[in-house]
Amino acid sequence: MKDNVLAQLAGLKSAPTPALKARWRELFDTEPPPYNRRFLESRLAYRIQELAYGGLSNDTLDRLRAMAKQYDGKAERKVGRGHRPITGTKLIREWQGVEHCVTVRAEDFEYMGRPFASLSSIARVITGTKWNGWVFFGLKTPGRS
């Protein structure tokens, strides 16, 4: 079975695009999307392996559903006062040769696996001094509201 799967995967690279689209119809029972060849190859490769070896475990599917429910509708950008980056955005700042990554969450921010109420508190942990967090992470120009 493993050899058959490997042969199918190898054949995707050399198959003409019409053959990939026909294979898509066979494996997904839908019309192929109008995306590029590389997308078709990668999705077909995944589907071939999924059918041969099984898909995601039930535990993984449950975790993904829980995450989707947690973030459902919370990624909308607020306009006006209290403007925040979209939930899930990664803010990256290099400070003294070290790259620091902060994740914007629905109600707070996460840095090094810990929740923080503000970007200013994270900037203080990183630098050891008081900073406006929005300025430190480049979300606001100093002196401008």
Image: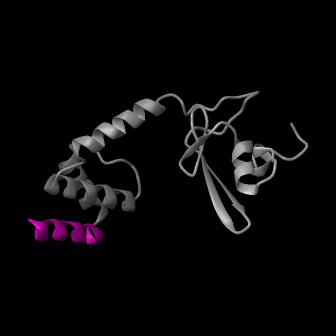
Residue at position x 37%, y 34% from top?
A: 66
Badge count: 0
Query: Is 133 within the magenta?
Result: no
Residue at position x 71%, y 55% from top?
A: 126
| Image quadrant assignment for residue 8 | bottom left
Where residue 7 appears, as percent x and y from the top left, is 17, 71
Q: Is residue 53 visible?
A: yes
Residue farthest to the left? Answer: 1
| Image quadrant assignment for residue 60 | top left
Q: Is residue 30 visible?
A: no
Residue farthest to the front? Answer: 128
Where residue 135 appears, as percent x and y from the top left, is 80, 47
Residue at position x 37%, y 61% from top?
A: 37
Q: Which residues are magenta?
A: 1-15
Residue at position x 69%, y 38% from top?
A: 118
Task: From the viewer's side, name the closer residue of 98 and 35.
Answer: 98
Image quadrant holding the N terminus, namely: bottom left
Where residue 99 appears, as percent x and y from the top left, is 65, 62
Give the prevailing secondary structure in the magenta stretch: helix
As drawn, 16 above or below 125? below
Question: In the picture provided, is 113 more to the left or to the right than 67?
Answer: right
Task: From the viewer's side, name the closer residue of 80 and 116.
Answer: 116
As drawn, 58 above or below 136? above
Where residue 28 appears, as percent x and y from the top left, is 22, 46
Question: In the picture provided, is 22 more to the left or to the right than 143?
Answer: left
Task: From the viewer's side, name the closer residue of 94 and 138.
Answer: 94
**Colouring scheme applied when the structure was drawn:** one colour
Image quadrant holding the C terminus, namely: top right
